[in-house]
Image: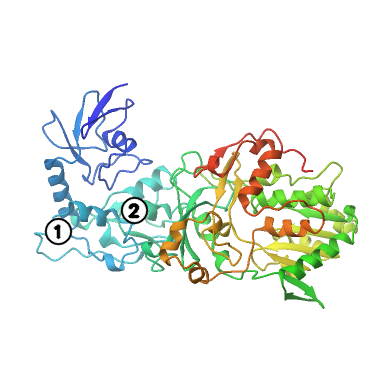
């Protein structure tokens, strides 16, 4: 392979790579504003100027192709001096309003001003004032004074979202970003422009002024908005989720995620939660303790024949939760009627990230054993059985079946006994006889399998009352925000909810289920020992980016 020398390091590269690409893949930082690895090259910020031997002038690393024998100096005196000049030019009309800017703490302009700027300006004239708080679309706010005209947002709309909505207007120091006449920035991926904006020009209207980046913790997780399972980061302050942002995974979502996923998949965590177990007493749902709720559930399950009972897993629950449900249903109670609801909207996929399947773990639920046993009823059959009176008891895991259709709501009302695991009060919990409070995806460890067969991790970003002092895998850096006093930290906005597999195991233990798992890793290890698709895997192997599993082989029958 050809070789290039950058900052004294001899590096191999592939033909067609630019200097900045070679440097980046080898851990060498080249300052830049307009360049982005997933977008075309525009070369208009000039921040990536480097010195290349035998070239008469400095060259921009983003568009200069690497060649065999080339010698590049990223931090030479000439290159650094040029960057200082570029920074002075960019800051001429910038308002320098970092104290009130949402981008503070994750702003390239801030970082480079500290590293390269001379600390003073020779510009004495009045700054050029542009429009502020411009609503470019339903989710994005534009502050023209902060814009450095890098064109990243324009190129994103054109090349990734496939919707030409933004362009430059005017010239010189009055140049600004604007939507085309009659258009607004409303493509399904518009908030990605706020992620790639290197300054605070584009900000999220949903997140504006809610928190500083240094006041929040960040936890790697996955989006539960559809079967894609986009990798994301959960940002939390005072135990409340404030935003989701995309996390790079080349095999899943690249650098992006859709607006629907980042805005509408986490707010339920903060509102109208099922806080503690509830049972129906004298026709009313009342809060109770776990012992009473479990005892009531067990007594009712024992009062019916297996053929009169059905279990519904959930494509919104983790593999561990669904696996424990299957163990309880098939292995302990010998119930054959077990399935889960599909949430498909045919034709809604867009060929970018959004999928027809609006549930994140349909494949994982099936692999975990949630499927009818031989001669058992599937989802539609279970509903028909309830209508005919054949099915009298239903155990429902983390899915709002009644909200799917008025017909389904009427069907569930015919049951003798309904048990529901739910994160929030909903149309199904209104009909329930027992409600167990389920931990949300951001409150537990677990795994999910996307539609491509990629097994990925959930991690707890929010503390619950049930969470033990080991934090069960939560990032220990979370404690840095509150010191080492766990009790003081964990009192903030905690909900009394538990991972569904824990409550299922407790119910099962009173009915002969011989499992005593303490943490989710042990549940997954049990799964890996008896389900071929998960054989040889553990949480460490899955890692931060997930792992592709064989989905052609179906899960072994849960005994």
Which quadrant does the C terminus fall into? top right
Q: Residue furthest top?
A: 1
For disc 2, the marked residue is 197
> Does residue 279 lie above or below 221 as drawn?
below
- In the foreground, 154 or 310: 310
Residue 525 vertical placement versus 218 (above, below): above
* Label ID, residue 119: 1
Q: Residues within 10 Å of mark 2 (few under 14, many from 20)?
A: many
Which residue lies at the image location 34% right of the left edge and 39% below the top edge? Answer: 40
Q: Is residue 415 visible to the viewer in this orientation of the structure?
A: no
Q: Quadrant of the N terminus?
A: top left
Residue in the image at 37% along x and 56% along y: 181
Instruction: Determine whether the residue tagged by mark 2 lies in a helix, strand or loop.
Output: loop
Rendered location of residue 297, percent (x, y): 80, 64
Could you say whether the residue bearing mark 1 is in a helix, strand or loop? loop
Name the residue at 11% across, 41% down. Answer: 78
Name the mark nearer the viewer: 1 or 2: 1
Numbered label tally: 2
Q: Earlier in the sequence, mark 1 or mark 2?
A: 1
Q: Determine whether 371 is above or below 171 in the image.
A: above
Q: Is residue 188 left or right of residue 200?
A: right
Q: What colouring does the structure picture have? A: rainbow
Residue 271: image location, x then y, percent: 57, 70
Q: Mark on residue 378?
A: none
Residue 95 placed where, x, y %? Answer: 22, 64
Locate residue 190 relative to residue 68 in the image: left or right. right
Depth check: give the residue in front, 169 or 216: 216
Q: Is residue 165 above or below residue 37?
A: below
Q: Residue at x 47, y 42 (%)?
A: 249
Occupied quadrant, residue 14: top left
Crowd band around label 1 with a 10 angstrom C-alpha radius: few (<14), some (14–19), many (20+): few
């Amino acid at each position: 392979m050809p070789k290039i020398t950058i900052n004294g390091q001899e590096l191999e590269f592939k033909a067609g790579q630019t200097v900045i690409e070679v440097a980046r893949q080898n851990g060498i930082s080249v300052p830049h504003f307009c360049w982005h690895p997933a977008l075309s090259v525009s070369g208009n910020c000039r921040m990536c100027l480097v010195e290349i031997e035998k070239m008469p002038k400095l060259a921009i690393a983003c568009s200069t192709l690497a060649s065999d024998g080339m010698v590049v100096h990223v931090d030479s005196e000439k290159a650094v001096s040029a960057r200082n000049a570029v920074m002075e030019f960019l800051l001429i009309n910038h308002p320098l309003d970092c104290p009130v800017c949402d981008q503070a703490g994750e702003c390239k302009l801030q970082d480079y001003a500290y590293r390269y700027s001379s600390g003073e300006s020779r510009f004495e004239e009045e700054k050029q004032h542009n429009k502020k708080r411009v609503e470019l679309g339903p989710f994005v706010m534009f502050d023209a004074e902060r814009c450095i005209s890098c064109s990243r947002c324009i190129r994103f709309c054109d090349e990734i979202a496939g919707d030409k909505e933004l362009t430059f207007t005017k010239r010189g120091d009055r140049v600004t970003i604007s939507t085309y006449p009659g258009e607004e920035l409303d493509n399904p991926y518009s908030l990605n422009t706020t992620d790639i904006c290197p300054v605070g020009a584009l900000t999220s209207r949903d997140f504006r002024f809610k928190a500083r980046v240094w006041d929040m913790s960040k936890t790697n997780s996955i989006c539960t908005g559809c079967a894609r399972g986009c990798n994301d980061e959960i940002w939390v302050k005072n135990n409340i989720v404030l935003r989701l942002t995309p996390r790079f995974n080349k095999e899943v979502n690249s650098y992006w995620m859709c607006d629907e996923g980042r805005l509408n998949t986490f707010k339920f965590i903060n509102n109208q939660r099922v806080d503690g177990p509830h049972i129906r007493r004298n026709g009313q749902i009342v809060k109770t303790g776990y012992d009473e709720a479990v005892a009531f559930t067990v007594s009712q399950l024992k009062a019916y024949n297996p053929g009169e009972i059905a279990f519904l897993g959930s494509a919104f629950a983790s593999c561990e939760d669904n696996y424990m449900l299957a163990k309880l249903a098939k292995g302990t109670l010998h119930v054959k009627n077990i399935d889960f609801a599909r949430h498909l909207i045919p034709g809604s996929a867009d060929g970018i990230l959004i999928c027809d399947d609006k549930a994140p773990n349909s494949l994982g639920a099936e692999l975990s054993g949630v499927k009818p046993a031989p001669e058992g009823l599937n989802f539609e059959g279970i509903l028909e059985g309830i209508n005919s009176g054949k099915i009298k008891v239903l155990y429902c895991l983390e899915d709002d079946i009644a909200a799917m259709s008025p017909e389904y709501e009427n069907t569930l009302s015919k049951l003798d006994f309904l048990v529901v695991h739910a994160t929030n009060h909903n149309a199904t919990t209104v009909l329930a006889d027992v409600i167990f409070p389920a931990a949300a995806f951001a409150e537990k460890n677990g795994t999910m399998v996307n539609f491509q067969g990629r097994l990925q991790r959930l991690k707890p970003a929010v503390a619950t009352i049930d969470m033990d002092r080991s934090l069960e895998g939560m990032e220990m850096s979370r404690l840095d925000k509150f010191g080492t006093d766990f009790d003081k930290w964990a009192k903030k906005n905690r909900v009394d909810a538990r991972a569904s597999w824990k409550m299922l195991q407790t119910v099962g233990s009173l009915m002969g289920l011989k499992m005593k798992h303490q943490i989710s890793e042990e549940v997954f290890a049990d799964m890996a020992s008896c389900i071929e698709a998960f054989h040889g895997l553990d949480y460490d192997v899955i890692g931060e980016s997930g792992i592709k599993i064989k989905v052609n082989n179906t899960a072994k029958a849960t005994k």
